[in-house]
Amino acid sequence: MPESLPDPRRHPRHADQRGRALDTPPAAVILAGGQGTRLRPLTLACPKPIVPLLNVPFLHYQLALLHRHGVREVVLACSYLLEAVQARLGDGRELGVRLRYAVEAEPLGTAGGVKNAATLAAGRLVVLNGDVLTDVDLTRMLGFHEARGARASLYLTAVEDPTAYGLVETDTDGRIRRFVEKPAREQITTNTVNAGIYLLERELLDLIPAGQVVSMERDFFPTLLERRVPCYGFAARAYWRDIGSPEQYRRAQVDLLKGAVDTPLSPPGTRRGDVWVGAGVSIAPGASVTGPAVLGAGVRLEPEARVGPLSVLGDNVRVGRGGRVEGAILWDNVSVGEAAVLSECVVGFGAVIGKGARVGAGAVVAENEVVP
């Protein structure tokens, strides 16, 4: 394992591509109105915008990305467990942005949500899907957009299996020729997909009917092509992951621990080599931690407990005598019993893992669930 966590501010992959902050930044809309059904049961208790990544609310990573590129005005389209989101994120001041909330009385779809949220923002918009962890260079994306006279630009990324996403075909200059939403295998002509970040000129919002359910992917973008509106795909070599499933959510944290994501954010606590240690952590004689790993405030490791690489323990987690945690994500107040073994799983708030229990790869334990 590396001697220390990679410093994301010295990330070699981006040394030659990170642009400076935008001179005239757009306002931002983050689409986070869904119920996070793919992340259930975790999102039954915690809305997706604030699920923890290295003990930091997920949306902090998107807000930090926007702030890095000079964006200061952000509107969050959000309705599910709204009070919990507002209590955790507040007005955005902590991350140097002005954060406002656009609430939909009834679901309006992704495009309808943008139109509704845009009433709180002026001018050109950058739109982010609320389940994307990325370090894409928004400054360079805007330069690409302006150089081509685009009215809409989509960030595109390459994936191994595009069948779960929206496939995007472009010409050699990046102009979009065709969208295929969640293609069948026989429809696959490219592996570049819609990565869920868009630059939109303001006048395009007039094409979205007010008060109706309208999809960006299935309705709005195809309409732009039909009307021959200049739409371009910005294909970038940047980190990208959709955190919307438990396994992808866990992998995103592994990537953060490995330094694969260029972000200014760090886990709460003090860095000791390749382990982040929160306040009041207690590690008994004979217990061990192998990094990279994160221990939240008040974590207690009893004798012979072992926390292995690529694990994240939330606040007040207890690991009993001889317990083992390897590559697992444990939310706050989890109790791991004596000699229990957890590997590459996700465990929700307050869950209790019994003495000698085994929780294996891919498992998800719900809030307050008891595993005997």
Image (tube, grey):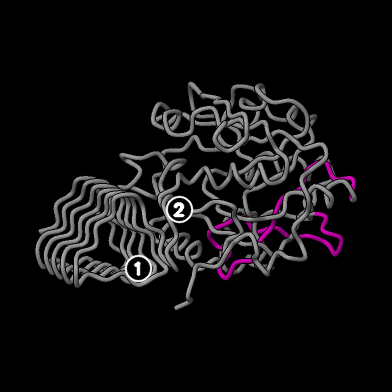
Q: CA distance from mark 2 to mark 1?
A: 16 Å
Residue beneath the point at 61% across and 59% down: 262
In-front residue for pair 226/230: 230
Does 253 sit left or right of 365 as displayed?
Answer: right
Residue beneath the point at 58% across and 64% down: 7
Residue beneath the point at 61% across and 53% down: 181
Q: Position of residue 335 (x, y in %)?
A: 18, 54
Name the amino acid type tagged 2: Pro
Q: Position of residue 73 (x, y in %)?
A: 67, 31
- In the image, residue 43 lies in the stretch drawn in magenta: no
Residue beneath the point at 31% across and 69% down: 289
- Element on which disc 1 rests: loop
Name the amino acid type tagged 1: Gly
Mark 1 = which residue?
327
Q: Residues within 10 Å of mark 2 (few under 14, many from 20)?
A: many
The circle drawn on residue 267 is 2
- Element on which disc 2 rests: loop
In-front residue for pair 160/85: 85
Q: Position of residue 184 (x, y in %)?
A: 56, 63
Q: Which residues are magenta?
A: 148-175
Does 115 sit left or right of 56 as displayed?
Answer: right
